[in-house]
Image (cartoon, rainbow, N blue to C red):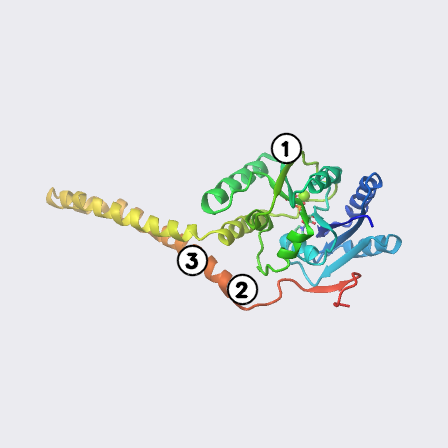
Amino acid sequence: MRKLISIVIPAYNEADNIPNILNKIRTVFQNLDYRYEVILVDDGSRDNTLDTIKSQALTDERIFFLEFSKNFGHQLAVKAGMDYAFGDCVISMDCDQQHPPELIPAMLEKWEAGYDVVYTVRGEDEKLSRSKRNSSSSFYKVLNWLSDIELEPGTADFRLLDQSVVKIFRKYHENEPFLRGLVKWSGFKQYALNYEPAQRYSGQSKYTVKKMVRLALQGVTSFSIKPLYTAVYLGFAFSLASVLYIPYVMYAFFSGHEVSGWASLIMTVVFFGGLQLIILGIIGIYVGKMFMQSKNRPNYIIRSTNLKTNLN
Ligand code: UDP
Ligand code: MG
Protein backbone atom coordinates (compact mmCIF):
# COMPACT_ATOMS: atom_id res chain seq x y z
CA MET A 1 0.00 0.00 0.00
CA ARG A 2 1.28 3.46 -0.84
CA LYS A 3 2.18 5.69 2.09
CA LEU A 4 -0.40 8.16 3.37
CA ILE A 5 0.55 11.82 3.78
CA SER A 6 -1.64 13.98 6.02
CA ILE A 7 -1.68 17.68 5.30
CA VAL A 8 -2.88 19.97 8.07
CA ILE A 9 -4.05 23.47 7.17
CA PRO A 10 -5.37 25.99 9.71
CA ALA A 11 -7.88 28.41 8.26
CA TYR A 12 -9.29 31.57 9.75
CA ASN A 13 -11.54 33.55 7.40
CA GLU A 14 -9.89 32.03 4.34
CA ALA A 15 -12.89 31.14 2.16
CA ASP A 16 -11.22 32.64 -0.94
CA ASN A 17 -7.99 30.74 -0.44
CA ILE A 18 -9.32 27.25 0.12
CA PRO A 19 -10.21 26.13 -3.42
CA ASN A 20 -6.86 27.37 -4.70
CA ILE A 21 -4.65 25.77 -2.12
CA LEU A 22 -6.52 22.47 -2.59
CA ASN A 23 -6.04 22.65 -6.35
CA LYS A 24 -2.34 23.27 -5.90
CA ILE A 25 -2.03 20.30 -3.58
CA ARG A 26 -3.89 18.10 -6.08
CA THR A 27 -1.50 19.18 -8.82
CA VAL A 28 1.55 18.50 -6.69
CA PHE A 29 0.37 15.01 -5.76
CA GLN A 30 -0.47 14.09 -9.35
CA ASN A 31 3.22 13.50 -9.91
CA LEU A 32 3.86 11.73 -6.61
CA ASP A 33 3.38 8.13 -5.70
CA TYR A 34 1.63 8.74 -2.38
CA ARG A 35 -1.88 8.75 -1.03
CA TYR A 36 -2.84 11.92 0.80
CA GLU A 37 -5.53 13.51 2.94
CA VAL A 38 -6.05 17.16 3.78
CA ILE A 39 -7.31 18.15 7.23
CA LEU A 40 -8.51 21.73 7.28
CA VAL A 41 -9.02 23.21 10.72
CA ASP A 42 -11.60 25.98 10.73
CA ASP A 43 -10.46 28.20 13.56
CA GLY A 44 -13.79 29.87 14.33
CA SER A 45 -14.02 31.71 11.01
CA ARG A 46 -16.76 34.27 10.57
CA ASP A 47 -16.93 34.02 6.79
CA ASN A 48 -18.02 30.92 4.89
CA THR A 49 -14.72 29.09 5.21
CA LEU A 50 -16.45 26.05 6.66
CA ASP A 51 -19.08 25.85 3.91
CA THR A 52 -16.35 26.12 1.30
CA ILE A 53 -14.48 23.24 2.89
CA LYS A 54 -17.66 21.18 3.18
CA SER A 55 -18.54 21.67 -0.46
CA GLN A 56 -15.00 20.63 -1.44
CA ALA A 57 -15.32 17.57 0.78
CA LEU A 58 -18.49 16.53 -1.06
CA THR A 59 -16.60 15.93 -4.27
CA ASP A 60 -13.27 14.80 -2.84
CA GLU A 61 -13.16 12.13 -0.16
CA ARG A 62 -9.57 13.06 0.75
CA ILE A 63 -10.72 16.33 2.31
CA PHE A 64 -11.60 16.54 5.98
CA PHE A 65 -12.44 19.34 8.32
CA LEU A 66 -12.33 20.03 12.02
CA GLU A 67 -14.54 22.90 13.10
CA PHE A 68 -13.47 24.72 16.24
CA SER A 69 -16.20 26.08 18.49
CA LYS A 70 -14.51 29.51 18.38
CA ASN A 71 -11.20 31.11 17.43
CA PHE A 72 -8.46 29.37 19.40
CA GLY A 73 -5.56 30.71 17.38
CA HIS A 74 -3.23 29.42 14.72
CA GLN A 75 -0.95 27.33 16.95
CA LEU A 76 -3.78 25.36 18.52
CA ALA A 77 -5.41 24.91 15.12
CA VAL A 78 -2.24 23.26 13.81
CA LYS A 79 -1.94 21.22 17.00
CA ALA A 80 -5.53 19.98 16.68
CA GLY A 81 -4.97 19.00 13.06
CA MET A 82 -1.89 17.05 14.08
CA ASP A 83 -3.78 15.32 16.87
CA TYR A 84 -6.17 13.88 14.28
CA ALA A 85 -3.67 13.24 11.49
CA PHE A 86 -2.65 9.61 11.27
CA GLY A 87 -0.77 9.53 7.97
CA ASP A 88 2.77 8.14 7.79
CA CYS A 89 3.90 11.72 7.98
CA VAL A 90 2.11 15.00 8.64
CA ILE A 91 2.78 18.24 6.78
CA SER A 92 1.46 21.50 8.22
CA MET A 93 1.13 24.58 6.07
CA ASP A 94 -0.74 27.88 5.80
CA CYS A 95 -3.82 28.41 3.74
CA ASP A 96 -2.66 31.46 1.82
CA GLN A 97 0.01 29.82 -0.39
CA GLN A 98 2.79 31.71 1.38
CA HIS A 99 4.01 28.21 2.14
CA PRO A 100 4.40 26.94 -1.43
CA PRO A 101 2.94 23.43 -1.90
CA GLU A 102 5.58 22.95 -4.62
CA LEU A 103 8.08 22.34 -1.82
CA ILE A 104 6.26 19.17 -0.72
CA PRO A 105 8.20 16.78 -3.02
CA ALA A 106 11.52 18.07 -1.62
CA MET A 107 10.21 17.59 1.93
CA LEU A 108 9.10 14.06 1.19
CA GLU A 109 12.47 13.27 -0.36
CA LYS A 110 14.27 14.26 2.84
CA TRP A 111 11.76 12.29 4.88
CA GLU A 112 12.38 9.21 2.74
CA ALA A 113 16.10 9.78 3.25
CA GLY A 114 15.53 9.17 6.95
CA TYR A 115 14.83 12.54 8.54
CA ASP A 116 11.99 12.61 11.10
CA VAL A 117 11.47 16.35 10.91
CA VAL A 118 11.81 18.49 7.80
CA TYR A 119 11.21 22.10 8.75
CA THR A 120 11.49 25.14 6.55
CA VAL A 121 13.27 28.43 6.89
CA ARG A 122 11.88 31.42 5.05
CA GLY A 123 14.38 33.33 2.92
CA GLU A 124 14.63 37.11 3.09
CA ASP A 125 11.53 38.25 1.31
CA GLU A 126 11.76 41.58 -0.47
CA LYS A 127 8.00 41.61 -0.91
CA LEU A 128 7.29 41.48 2.80
CA SER A 129 7.01 44.83 4.48
CA ARG A 130 10.18 46.08 6.16
CA SER A 131 8.46 46.24 9.53
CA LYS A 132 7.38 42.59 9.29
CA ARG A 133 10.91 41.50 8.33
CA ASN A 134 12.50 43.51 11.14
CA SER A 135 10.02 42.39 13.74
CA SER A 136 10.50 38.78 12.66
CA SER A 137 14.31 38.86 12.78
CA SER A 138 14.45 40.68 16.13
CA PHE A 139 11.91 38.18 17.47
CA TYR A 140 14.27 35.28 16.76
CA LYS A 141 17.27 37.14 18.19
CA VAL A 142 15.46 37.84 21.45
CA LEU A 143 14.01 34.34 21.58
CA ASN A 144 17.39 32.66 21.08
CA TRP A 145 19.02 34.93 23.61
CA LEU A 146 16.38 34.43 26.25
CA SER A 147 15.50 30.80 25.82
CA ASP A 148 17.29 27.51 25.77
CA ILE A 149 16.48 26.59 22.19
CA GLU A 150 18.10 27.84 18.98
CA LEU A 151 15.70 28.68 16.16
CA GLU A 152 16.96 29.92 12.79
CA PRO A 153 15.48 33.31 11.89
CA GLY A 154 12.53 32.74 9.60
CA THR A 155 11.61 29.26 10.86
CA ALA A 156 8.06 28.75 9.66
CA ASP A 157 5.12 26.63 10.70
CA PHE A 158 5.56 24.82 7.38
CA ARG A 159 7.02 21.45 8.18
CA LEU A 160 6.89 17.72 7.80
CA LEU A 161 6.82 15.49 10.85
CA ASP A 162 7.08 11.75 10.83
CA GLN A 163 4.14 10.01 12.51
CA SER A 164 6.49 8.91 15.31
CA VAL A 165 7.08 12.59 16.15
CA VAL A 166 3.39 13.47 15.83
CA LYS A 167 2.64 10.67 18.27
CA ILE A 168 4.87 12.40 20.82
CA PHE A 169 3.11 15.70 20.11
CA ARG A 170 -0.23 14.18 21.05
CA LYS A 171 1.14 13.88 24.55
CA TYR A 172 1.87 17.60 24.80
CA HIS A 173 -1.00 19.39 26.47
CA GLU A 174 0.24 22.95 26.58
CA ASN A 175 -2.57 25.42 26.32
CA GLU A 176 -0.33 27.94 24.59
CA PRO A 177 1.89 25.73 22.45
CA PHE A 178 4.71 27.35 20.53
CA LEU A 179 5.09 24.66 17.90
CA ARG A 180 8.33 25.84 16.28
CA GLY A 181 10.02 25.71 19.64
CA LEU A 182 8.44 22.40 20.61
CA VAL A 183 9.60 20.81 17.37
CA LYS A 184 13.16 21.96 17.93
CA TRP A 185 13.04 20.97 21.57
CA SER A 186 11.76 17.48 20.78
CA GLY A 187 14.96 16.53 19.02
CA PHE A 188 14.85 13.69 16.45
CA LYS A 189 16.69 13.89 13.14
CA GLN A 190 15.88 17.30 11.73
CA TYR A 191 16.55 18.85 8.35
CA ALA A 192 16.11 22.51 7.42
CA LEU A 193 14.89 23.39 3.93
CA ASN A 194 15.08 26.94 2.66
CA TYR A 195 12.23 28.39 0.67
CA GLU A 196 11.16 31.65 -0.89
CA PRO A 197 7.76 32.66 0.44
CA ALA A 198 5.12 33.70 -2.02
CA GLN A 199 2.70 36.58 -1.67
CA ARG A 200 -0.47 35.92 0.30
CA TYR A 201 -2.93 34.75 -2.37
CA SER A 202 -6.05 36.48 -1.12
CA GLY A 203 -7.15 38.54 1.87
CA GLN A 204 -5.20 40.13 4.67
CA SER A 205 -2.77 38.64 7.16
CA LYS A 206 -4.70 37.27 10.12
CA TYR A 207 -1.76 37.93 12.39
CA THR A 208 -2.34 41.33 13.89
CA VAL A 209 0.48 43.11 15.74
CA LYS A 210 -1.25 42.12 18.96
CA LYS A 211 -1.20 38.44 17.98
CA MET A 212 2.46 38.67 16.96
CA VAL A 213 3.51 40.22 20.27
CA ARG A 214 1.55 37.54 22.06
CA LEU A 215 3.22 34.78 20.07
CA ALA A 216 6.62 36.30 20.83
CA LEU A 217 5.91 36.43 24.56
CA GLN A 218 4.53 32.90 24.45
CA GLY A 219 7.62 31.72 22.61
CA VAL A 220 9.98 33.15 25.18
CA THR A 221 8.03 32.27 28.28
CA SER A 222 7.20 28.71 27.28
CA PHE A 223 10.82 27.78 26.72
CA SER A 224 12.72 29.54 29.39
CA ILE A 225 12.68 30.98 32.86
CA LYS A 226 15.62 33.18 31.93
CA PRO A 227 13.49 36.36 32.01
CA LEU A 228 12.91 35.69 35.72
CA TYR A 229 16.66 35.51 36.25
CA THR A 230 17.08 38.66 34.20
CA ALA A 231 14.75 40.36 36.66
CA VAL A 232 16.95 39.24 39.55
CA TYR A 233 20.14 40.39 37.80
CA LEU A 234 18.58 43.76 37.04
CA GLY A 235 17.62 44.05 40.70
CA PHE A 236 21.22 43.37 41.74
CA ALA A 237 22.63 45.77 39.16
CA PHE A 238 20.43 48.61 40.30
CA SER A 239 21.02 48.00 44.00
CA LEU A 240 24.73 48.15 43.28
CA ALA A 241 24.28 51.33 41.27
CA SER A 242 22.34 52.90 44.12
CA VAL A 243 25.17 52.06 46.53
CA LEU A 244 27.55 53.86 44.20
CA TYR A 245 25.21 56.82 44.38
CA ILE A 246 25.84 57.28 48.14
CA PRO A 247 29.19 59.10 47.78
CA TYR A 248 27.52 61.56 45.42
CA VAL A 249 24.72 62.16 47.92
CA MET A 250 27.30 62.77 50.69
CA TYR A 251 29.19 65.13 48.46
CA ALA A 252 26.02 67.04 47.58
CA PHE A 253 25.04 67.22 51.25
CA PHE A 254 28.37 68.60 52.44
CA SER A 255 28.73 71.07 49.63
CA GLY A 256 25.21 72.40 50.17
CA HIS A 257 23.75 71.29 46.79
CA GLU A 258 21.28 68.79 48.12
CA VAL A 259 17.98 70.59 47.26
CA SER A 260 18.82 70.70 43.59
CA GLY A 261 18.22 66.94 43.33
CA TRP A 262 14.55 67.06 42.38
CA ALA A 263 15.06 66.18 38.71
CA SER A 264 17.24 63.17 39.43
CA LEU A 265 14.84 62.08 42.16
CA ILE A 266 11.80 62.11 39.94
CA MET A 267 13.76 60.36 37.19
CA THR A 268 14.77 57.62 39.58
CA VAL A 269 11.22 57.20 40.87
CA VAL A 270 9.80 56.98 37.36
CA PHE A 271 12.53 54.65 36.18
CA PHE A 272 12.22 52.24 39.06
CA GLY A 273 8.44 52.41 38.92
CA GLY A 274 8.59 51.29 35.29
CA LEU A 275 11.18 48.63 35.97
CA GLN A 276 9.15 47.16 38.79
CA LEU A 277 6.06 47.02 36.60
CA ILE A 278 7.97 45.21 33.86
CA ILE A 279 9.36 42.68 36.30
CA LEU A 280 5.97 42.17 37.92
CA GLY A 281 4.56 41.69 34.44
CA ILE A 282 7.13 39.01 33.64
CA ILE A 283 6.34 37.18 36.85
CA GLY A 284 2.66 37.65 36.09
CA ILE A 285 2.96 35.92 32.72
CA TYR A 286 4.45 32.84 34.33
CA VAL A 287 1.89 32.80 37.12
CA GLY A 288 -0.84 33.21 34.50
CA LYS A 289 0.52 30.27 32.56
CA MET A 290 0.48 28.10 35.66
CA PHE A 291 -3.06 29.24 36.40
CA MET A 292 -4.32 28.42 32.90
CA GLN A 293 -2.54 25.09 32.81
CA SER A 294 -3.64 24.07 36.30
CA LYS A 295 -7.30 24.36 35.36
CA ASN A 296 -6.71 21.52 32.97
CA ARG A 297 -9.33 22.66 30.51
CA PRO A 298 -9.31 21.23 27.00
CA ASN A 299 -6.96 23.34 24.91
CA TYR A 300 -9.42 23.51 22.04
CA ILE A 301 -13.00 22.45 21.45
CA ILE A 302 -14.16 20.78 18.27
CA ARG A 303 -17.72 21.57 17.28
CA SER A 304 -17.98 19.23 14.32
CA THR A 305 -15.90 17.13 11.96
CA ASN A 306 -16.27 14.68 9.10
CA LEU A 307 -13.31 12.64 10.35
CA LYS A 308 -14.13 9.18 11.59
CA THR A 309 -13.32 9.78 15.24
CA ASN A 310 -15.18 9.09 18.44
CA LEU A 311 -16.27 12.74 18.43
CA ASN A 312 -19.22 12.05 16.15
N1 UDP B 1 -4.79 31.42 11.30
C1 UDP B 1 -5.60 30.72 12.17
N2 UDP B 1 -6.09 31.34 13.30
C2 UDP B 1 -5.78 32.65 13.61
C3 UDP B 1 -4.91 33.35 12.72
C4 UDP B 1 -4.44 32.70 11.58
O1 UDP B 1 -5.91 29.54 11.94
O2 UDP B 1 -6.24 33.14 14.63
C5 UDP B 1 -4.28 30.75 10.09
C6 UDP B 1 -4.52 31.50 8.79
O3 UDP B 1 -5.77 31.17 8.24
C7 UDP B 1 -3.37 31.00 7.93
C8 UDP B 1 -2.26 30.78 8.93
O4 UDP B 1 -2.88 30.66 10.20
O5 UDP B 1 -3.65 29.78 7.27
C9 UDP B 1 -1.24 31.90 8.96
O6 UDP B 1 -1.88 33.14 9.13
P1 UDP B 1 -1.51 34.43 8.28
O7 UDP B 1 -1.24 34.07 6.86
O8 UDP B 1 -2.58 35.43 8.53
O9 UDP B 1 -0.16 34.89 9.01
P2 UDP B 1 1.15 35.52 8.35
O10 UDP B 1 1.50 34.63 7.18
O11 UDP B 1 0.79 36.89 7.95
O12 UDP B 1 2.17 35.44 9.45
MG1 MG C 1 0.31 34.16 5.65
Left or right of 257 on screen, residue 130 = right
Q: In the picture shown, does residue 169 fall above or below 108?
A: below
| Residue at mark 1 | 125
| Residue at mark 2 | 293
> Mark 1: which secondary structure?
loop
| Residue at mark 3 | 283
Q: Residue at x 89, y 53 (%)?
A: 59
The front one of 106 and 51 is 106
Q: Residue at x 60, y 47 (%)?
A: 188
Q: Amino acid at mark 1?
A: Asp
Ligand 2 in which quarter: top right
Left or right of 266 on screen, residue 164 = right
In whole angstroms, how far apart are the C-alphas of marks 2 and 1?
Answer: 37 Å
x then y, percent, for residue 213: 54, 48
| Label 2 C-beta lies within 8 Å of the nearest ligand 1 atom | no
Left or right of 143 on screen, residue 180 = right
**Quarter in which the C terminus is drawn:** bottom right
The front one of 114 and 201 is 114
Q: Are marks 3 and 2 in contact (CB under 8 Å)?
A: no
